[in-house]
Image (cartoon, coloured by chain):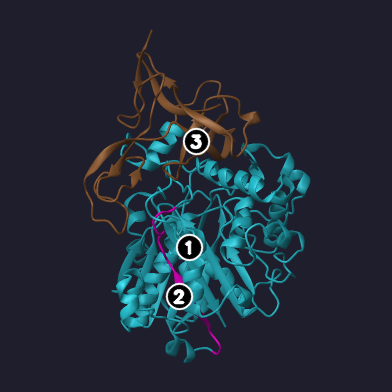
Chain colours: A brown, B cyan
Amino acid sequence: MKARVPAVEGWFTMDEDQPHLLGNRCVTCGTVFFPRAETACRNPGCRGGDFEEAPLSRRGRVWSYTTNHYAPPPPFVAGDPFQPYTIAAVELAEEKMVVLGQLDGDPTRLRVGAEVELVLATLFEDDEHEHVVWKWRPL
Amino acid sequence: MEVETAVSGTEAAPQASGRGRVAVLGVGMHPWGKWGRSFVEYGLVAARAALDDAGLDWPDVQFVSGADTVRNGYPGYVAGSTFAQALGWQGAQVASSYSACASGATALGAARAQILAGLCDVALVVGADTTPRGFLAPTSGDRPDDPDWLRFRLLGATNPTYFALYARRRMELHGATDADFARVKVKNARHGMANPYARYRKEVTEEEVLASPLVADPLRLLEICATSDGGAAVVLSSLEFARRRTTGPVRVAGLSTVTPRFPNTVIEMPNFATDSAATVAPPESPFRDSIAEKAYQEAGVGPEDLSLAEVYDLSSALELDWYENIGLCKPGEAERLLHDGDTALGGRVPVNPSGGLSCFGEAVPAQALAQVCEVTWQLRGQAQGRQVQDAKVGLTVNQGLFGHGSCVILER
């Protein structure tokens, strides 16, 4: 069995049961950023530069979605044969933000407003590893 | 009043207006296509056409403003000097701008500022591109710190992905249908048939659009703009200079290159997420609305004054969003405008009489300038076969990757 490694370092927890996206929160004004704000708080009314880790809500509602029927160019790693995949934009109520992710599940019954939950799923495999990314799974 | 507004910080900036003080003296284009030649050649052809149109010689130009291309190596990053050298060094001052799809407007803004400041009388603005086949891809190499690279790697979020998210949202929010989107394409295809600079000049039917392959559901191949080679150029001058050479020149009434305001709550290419609106309330106008608002404010006109508009129809569905963003109608009413024929040639306010990106495909740094060329021809009554009757005021609008607004209002 291949080792499962994150396809990007530090963007989400590798907790297979209850994964969270990892943003950060400005300790001065409380604004949350995902991906993490690196250098300074991006709220123009705030001069903060210190952040704490902020795991994002695991559930949200679909803002919109689409299925791609053509293989994207690299650095996307497309399967052979290419399989269409769905991307969902998901609204997180507490953070009041919309976060993209691939859909893990059947897109045919998806609707704007549908509830989804964050899961970890394989993005692509190479000889040694399964590269893992976050996806949204319909509830 | 001054004291009160100064407290709120962002409102304190002086509302200077350049309305009407800069003229569009000449415009020129190289036809759009997939020619496979150097972008420098397209820019050169367009620049010479614009100079001829202005009745000027290249040595008359005092400032060259290039819109960069990022797909053609170093010469593309310094487009202003690349075009200046191609035309023959003559000592003009130079600048080069990059702001993705908005690059042409940014370069135009730089040239206009020189003229408004009295630093020069005549400026040449040029943008041109040579594009690869297929999807626009991020710059190659392993770049895990670049969101444009990561969105392809982690999500497979192509440009059409974002257009499709807006289209699907429009369907669910406003009841838009596949047929509505197809009709936008049909309209623009008809408009572009008479445009000698358009790449696609063929009528298409609603059935043909709906039979074309799905790219990013609900958008189909014929509804998503292609990538093209092309070049466009604009000669700007002070109004006094223009009046010595011509009567009733087209004038720049307003020009906007605004960035978004925090928090930006619409998911934008190439981002993974929106800003959070949990601590700061969203601005009154979403980013896309604010682009035209700034130009209207400077020009002292409103949407009701427009004779025509050239909007950035990266997808057929996105054109409908733009109707609302530039104030032609309220949110949710764009489909009615389309059905009533308001935005077709002969209607109340024709949109994309050039045929739009639908007939051109996108040549990134040239596209905002191509929009300005078209509006100029329309205002002069020179848009043969696609002329908007008695055109007085025209607007161009687009949006570039990473938060670049672009809107130009021209009047005659």
Q: Any magenta on residue B249?
A: yes
From which residue to which does the magenta span run?
B247-264
| Residue at the image point whose x is 71% and y is 47% from the top | B177
Q: Are marks 3 and 1 in contact (CB under 8 Å)?
A: no
Answer few, some or many: residues within 10 Å of disc 2's Cα (few below 14, many 20 plus, some between 14 and 19).
many
Q: Mark 3 is on which residue type?
A: Gly
Label 2 to label 3: alpha-carbon separation: 51 Å
Q: Which residue is mark 1?
A: B284
Q: Which mark is residue A60?
A: 3
Q: Marks 3 and 2: in contact by CB < 8 Å?
A: no
Q: Give the class, few, some or many, for how many residues have Cα within 10 Å of label 3's Cα (few <14, many ≥20).
A: many
Q: Distance between the Cα atoms at labels 2 and 1?
A: 36 Å
**In the displayed structure, does residue B26 sit left or right of residue B89?**
right
Q: Quadrant of residue B141 in the image? A: top left
| Separation (CA) of disc 3 from disc 1 | 25 Å
Q: Identify the image quadrant of residue A24.
A: top left
Same chain for the residues under marks 3 and 1 in the image: no
Q: How many marks?
A: 3
B191 relative to A33 in the view: left or right: right
The quadrant the N terminus of chain B occupies is bottom left
Screen quadrant of the C terminus of chain B: bottom right
